[in-house]
Amino acid sequence: MNNINTLTQASIALKFGKTTSVELTQKCIQRIESIDENIGCYLCVDKIGAMKQAIDSDARRKFNQSLGELDGIPIGIKDMISCKGLPLNASSKILQDYLASYDATVIRNLRSKGAVIIGKLNQDEFGMGSSGENSAYKICKNPVNLSRTPGGSSSGSAAAIAANLAFGTLGTDTGGSVRQPAAFTGTVGIKPTYGRVSRFGVIAFASSLDQVGVFGHKVEDAATLLSGIAGYDEQDSTSIKISVPNYNLTLNRDIKGVRIGIPKEYLNKDVALDPEVKTCVENAISRLRTLGAKVYFISLPHVHLSVAAYHIISTAEASSNLARYDGIRYGPRIGFEGGFKNLYKETRGKLFGAEVKRRILLGTFVLSASCYDSYYIKAQKIRSLIVDDFRNAFTLVDAIICPTVPSVAYPLGERINDPLKMYLGDIFTIPANLAGLPGISIPGGFSKENLPIGIQLIGRPFEESNILNIAHMLEKILKINNEPVK
Ligand code: GLN
């Protein structure tokens, strides 16, 4: 398997009989057993289940009944997503020992295409965080440099790709949790349009922002995996009935004349942008120009308000979504002998982590009668202005380019006691969630310290194929070596 690193390579090798699903799955499991103790990607590995799925896949292939590109490919799943029979903990103690009783639609879709579900991946508790340090179980490290954060909240999903502990992974992105860890680990991560992928069976953090996304080494890997999970689902009322292209077939289109916008607000002095990140984005822009793209400055006049609006809207929704964890319906129970009030207080007080409690408190506060208009309604108005900003920009350009994150991966421990600093790192990713737009992060280069830098492309609603194509062309011309960590 030494020369099979990416999902696409694995898929081709399977197709031409150069390997088997059993071999790929076994090697993944062996590698997890030998190195993941030092990284912390997996919360659980379904050895027996994965091997059984691999055996079934090989049997199908033998009888020429392969289910396509994903058949037999080991895929890791963020712990926010239900996989029947496996633990579903959202990396929280409040869901400790809880087992999923059904498959999320994205998992059903993957299984119907023969993918091998290998295990559940570490994350920030309930998706709240940007560094992986808010997991109640263990810290996840960046395989590129173990002293650094892999980003979050889909920390394990990104790190597992960077360390070759899965060929593709699923994450969720509410404010950047797929794109930001992709940037920090030198992997590719795409968050599709709100409504493109079903959220049925996915633990809700902030329902108007949450979307399932995918990780891979290369754009084509992400394209294959996204094609595998996307599509309308009648069990998710927010999913949209629009046909899903085969994203791989729309790669390699010429981008001559494609109009790309640079938001001028992102170059303001008050945006703390690391000079190395800025240089990397500028380099990507000049390469796009050489490919014939037309680059323009555009304006997104309200994006500077996005982090504040996000932390009002997302916490308000989280305070409601997380009310269900009451010590009665799911997970462990503390303080039952003191009556119901005591049960709620003890269970929620002891089993939610500090960041989750901070968000529940903030969300409850902004929804309280005296704050509702001045915070919640105001944030919704700002959200509408940001939606309009993008709508206007997309009359002038076909895609927007900007950094994924203002910095490279910072040392573990650096921001965990400074939540505001942590939140501000999401400045470039949050706007796409507020506007429901698709966004992709691809590796654009490395810093002097050899840490990956992410380039983000944002597209019009349901134009994933457009940003995947631009990203793919950019990836080809940049020739970044993001081979998995040895
Ligand atoms: N880092 C952001 C937060 O802490 C986004 C998280 C996410 O996308 N799930 O809320």
Image (spheres, grey):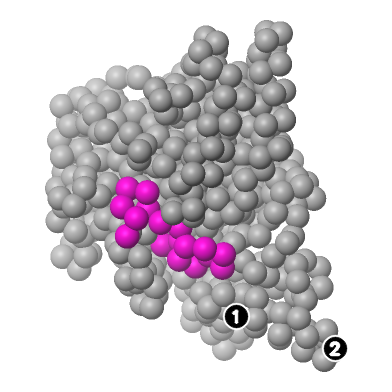
Task: Determine whether, in the image, residue 313 is placed left or right of residue 446.
Answer: right
Query: Dot 1: few (<14), some (14–19), or many (≥20) neighbours within 10 Å?
Result: some
Give the residue at mark 2: 337
Pick the front one: 386 or 115: 115
Type of the residue with mark 2: Glu
Task: Determine whether, in the image, residue 126 is placed left or right of residue 469.
Answer: right
Task: Determine whether, in the image, residue 139 is placed left or right of residue 350.
Answer: left
Report x, y in % for residue 63: 71, 8
Report x, y in % for residue 368: 60, 84
Separation of marks 1 and 2 at Cα, in angstroms: 27 Å
Q: Earlier in the sequence, mark 1 or mark 2?
A: 2
Residue 330, visible in the rendered structure:
yes
Give the residue at mark 1: 364
| Magenta range | 130-147
Q: Which of label 1 and label 2 is nearer to you?
A: 2
Q: Are marks 1 and 2 in contact (CB under 8 Å)?
A: no
Residue 220, visible in the rendered structure:
no
Report x, y in % for residue 97: 73, 62
Query: Dot 2: few (<14), some (14–19), or many (≥20) neighbours within 10 Å?
Result: few
Q: Secondary structure at mark 2?
A: helix
Quadrant of the image occupied by residue 270:
bottom left
